[in-house]
Image: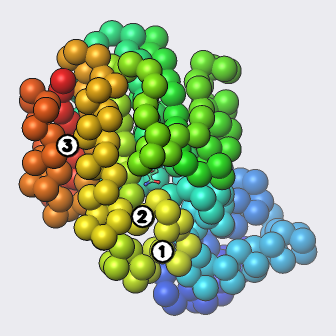
Amino acid sequence: MVRELLKNAALRLTNSDTPMLDARVLLAKVMGAENAAMIFNMPNEKQIKTFQEYISRRQNGEPVAYILGEKEFMGFTFQLNSDTLIPRPDTECLVEKVLELNRISSPKILDLCTGSGCIGISLAKMIDKSTLELTDISEGALSMAKLNANELLASDSTKVYSLDILNEEISGKYDIITANPPYIEREIAKNLPVSEYEPMRALDGGEDGLTFYKVISKKAFSALNKGGMLALEIGYDQKEKVCSLLTDFSEVLDFKDYGGNDRVIVCFK
Ligand code: GLN
């Protein structure tokens, strides 16, 4: 019976690349099970109704992560809302590079444009005795970042506050500054399929896609301690342009993601 329910749901998800997986994950959520392979009883009527609602949302193109309200990143579960981007596996490369290249013990970390908080919180979980500040312009994103920090890190060890990086200054001094800012050219961002559900504010990098990098490269340099690191996620075609903004830094390294695209720049003051 459960198989039948899943099969019929998957048949409705013609626009998904992974219809059966989507149906399984959504049914598991409805039934509070670890995964759909663990479901032995037929869901009750109320659960079936919720499941069918989830399937309809998925059928309309809503990403599974938004329907679930969560996404796994670096092995941790982050809560999401419509003001946060869905954390991407490519962004895990940024976190891994920071972990690999950090030379400072007990670092002070600042994550700009934090969204769900996935970058900063993952780093703070994995770097011993680090302190963390998460900033964003979006109140909706900040409420999620706060929730995720409370859930995943020791209570009140993290400062979460509003910072409009384009118009405000960074006030403290840090050893690690990270950012996955909006970096898609405005005209392209408007027509991206993901922009139907993901916040335009988290995608739109201005006319040339570089608005945030131009500002962050300057403000982060001033706010870093000597030897400190700035780590940026970039678009697949932005390496040269972003590197040319980082001439103040003493060492600029670039890295590819798992798909072989340029994705991360790490530089040191
Ligand atoms: N830092 C968050 C992420 O990497 C949000 C990025 C953004 O909103 N541009 O998912």
Using the image, determine if residue 203 lies above or below residue 188.
Answer: above
**Secondary structure found at label 3:** strand
State left or right for residue 205 relative to residue 32: left
Residue at x 43% of width, y 31% of height: 170
Please tell me the numbered disc located at residue 265.
3
Circle 1 crowding by C-alpha within 10 Å: few under 14, some 14–19, many from 20:
some
Q: Mark 3 near mark 2, Cβ–Cβ under 8 Å?
A: no
The mark that comes first in sequence, 3 or 2, is 2
Say if mark 2 contacts mark 1, CB within 8 Å. Answer: yes
From the viewer's perspective, is residue 115 above or below residue 9? above
For disc 2, the marked residue is 203
Residue that label 1 marks: 195
Q: Position of residue 64 (x, y in %)?
A: 58, 67
Q: CA distance from mark 3 to mark 2?
A: 18 Å
Q: Amino acid at mark 2?
A: Leu
Q: Quadrant of the C terminus?
A: top left
